[in-house]
Image: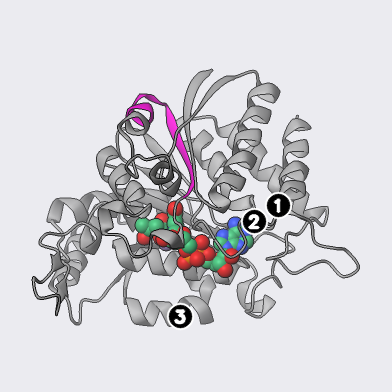
């Protein structure tokens, strides 16, 4: 297959993990006889540093012309005082919206051997396999009006959801559940918010079309507790934009490290694939970033955007094999008697195993 992939390295460890992702893509191309044309573009703080806006027109054009987009991460504390449109994060928000990528799939899976990597007890996390289906182009992130009052003494954002927005993301969650454990937990704050009451009603209505799926509803505060105490009770978690942002980072803590989590943002013109983590300024430049979330996002890109299932599975198997061989970056619990490895060594260990795939 010939495919064009737009690479948006961005900032901080985004650049490091994008290098790992691009090597993984090249390994897949060589091993399976594909031709992937990787085109890199500026985005985020890197674009601002180059005198451009966070999402330059050329970057957006390249993304829209590609078969899939891979993004590392954006964000740099030096832009913290800037207005929203001049912050690196504006790039991601605008890109998701321009693409119409409303469905964000964030799987969190405990890799065998990593049960003791996080701070939860191994017997609590063993076997956890959750998919957070996060609505990505609505809610508080995009609702109008938003702003700061003229006197600077108050600020406001709007949480808004339409029936149509809820229906389409609910359908993604139910369809995803059909391919997994056949359970959907819809998470809201229906005891307080009108948007959540509409959410609950529409999700219930959509659920009637899926009698084979077991649907439950939970308040987001209770879910934040239960996911950390009984994480195995979840299969698919369906939730709105901000709740999904928070719960997906929390699921990183449960499975051992935020650096392990991949994501796919689909439903729009072109699929966007990125690790869940940010630019991690605290570890950037130190060869410490776990590249598994990024390489796992490559697997999701292959599966969802390019429909290359065997290749996606090969990438996931290579990750599992590198972990089984004892490779651990510093965010993971080391194997007794074995030293942790750097970001590049972990990536190399995985890529060698992709290249050895049958
Ligand atoms: P972060 O996700 O960058 O980091 C949170 C913590 O997790 C840090 O301690 C970091 O060292 C650790 N971590 C993250 N990724 C890791 C990895 N691959 N391996 C090992 N450890 C890892 O969140 P933050 O510090 O709150 O945000 C930093 C910047 O990133 C901010 O500007 C934020 O807006 C931005 N951000 C961007 C994205 C994105 O581009 N998709 C996502 C989240 C945050
Ligand atoms: C994420 C990030 C983004 C979000 C930020 C950087 C805009 O935290 O992808 O999880 O909040 O969606
Ligand atoms: Mn986030």
Question: Within 8 Å of ligand 1, the CB of disc 2?
Answer: yes
Q: Which residue is mark 1?
A: 343
Distance of mark 1 from mark 2, alpha carbons?
5 Å
In the picture, residue 327 is in which quadrant?
A: bottom right
Label 1 with label 2: CB-CB less than 8 Å: yes
Residue 322 x %, y %: 77, 49
Relative to the observer, which residue lies in front, 50 or 255? 50
Which range of residues does the magenta coloring cover?
61-73
Name the one closer to the observer, 30 or 87. 87
Residue 50 relative to residue 124: left or right:
left
Q: Is residue 317 above or below residue 211?
A: above
The CA distance from mark 3 to mark 2 is 29 Å
- In the picture, the disc for residue 289 is 2
Labels 3 & 1 near each other (Cβ < 8 A): no
Q: Which residue is mark 3?
A: 226
Q: Relative to residue 204, is residue 56 depicted above or below?
A: above
Nearer to the camera, 60 or 357: 60
Q: Does residue 254 sit above or below 104 in this rendering?
A: below
Dot 3 or dot 2, earlier in sequence:
3
**Numbered disc 3: secondary structure:** helix
For ligand 1, tell me if the residue under mark 1 lies within 8 Å. Answer: yes
**Tag 1 or tag 3, which sits nearer the N-term?**
3
Q: Residue at x 9, y 75 (%)?
A: 151
């Amino acid at each position: 297959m010939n495919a064009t992939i737009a690479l948006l390295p961005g900032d901080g460890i985004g650049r490091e993990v994008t290098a790992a992702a691009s090597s993984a893509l090249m390994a897949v191309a060589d091993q399976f006889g594909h031709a992937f044309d990787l085109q890199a573009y500026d985005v985020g703080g890197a674009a601002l540093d180059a005198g451009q806006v966070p999402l330059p027109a050329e970057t957006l054009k390249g993304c829209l012309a590609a078969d899939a987009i891979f993004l590392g991460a954006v964000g740099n504390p030096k832009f913290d005082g800037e207005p929203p449109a001049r912050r690196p994060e504006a790039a991601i928000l605008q890109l998701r919206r321009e693409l119409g990528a409303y469905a964000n799939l964030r799987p969190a899976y405990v890799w065998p051997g990593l049960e003791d990597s996080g701070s939860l007890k191994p017997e609590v996390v063993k076997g956890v396999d959750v998919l957070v289906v996060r609505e990505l182009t609505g809610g508080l992130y995009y609702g109008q009006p938003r702003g700061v009052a003229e006197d600077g003494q108050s600020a406001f954002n709007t949480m808004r959801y339409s029936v149509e927005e809820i229906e389409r993301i609910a359908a993604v969650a139910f369809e995803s559940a059909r391919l997994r454990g056949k359970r959907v937990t819809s998470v809201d704050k229906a005891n307080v918010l009108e948007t959540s009451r509409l959410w609950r009603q529409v999700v219930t209505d959509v659920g009637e079309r899926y009698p084979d799926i077991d649907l439950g509803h939970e308040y987001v505060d209770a879910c934040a507790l239960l996911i950390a105490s009984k994480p195995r009770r979840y299969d698919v978690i369906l939730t709105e934009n901000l709740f999904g942002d928070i719960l997906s980072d929390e699921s990183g803590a449960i499975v051992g490290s935020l650096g392990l989590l991949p994501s796919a943002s689909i439903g729009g013109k072109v699929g966007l694939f990125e690790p869940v983590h940010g630019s991690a300024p605290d570890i950037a430049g130190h060869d410490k970033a776990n590249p598994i979330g990024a390489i796992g996002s490559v697997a999701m890109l292959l599966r969802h955007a390019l429909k290359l299932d065997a290749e996606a599975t090969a990438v996931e198997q290579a990750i599992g094999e590198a972990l089984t061989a004892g490779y651990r970056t510093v965010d993971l619990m080391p194997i007794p008697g074995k030293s942790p490895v750097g970001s590049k060594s972990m990536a190399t260990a995985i890529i060698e195993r992709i290249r050895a795939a049958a």
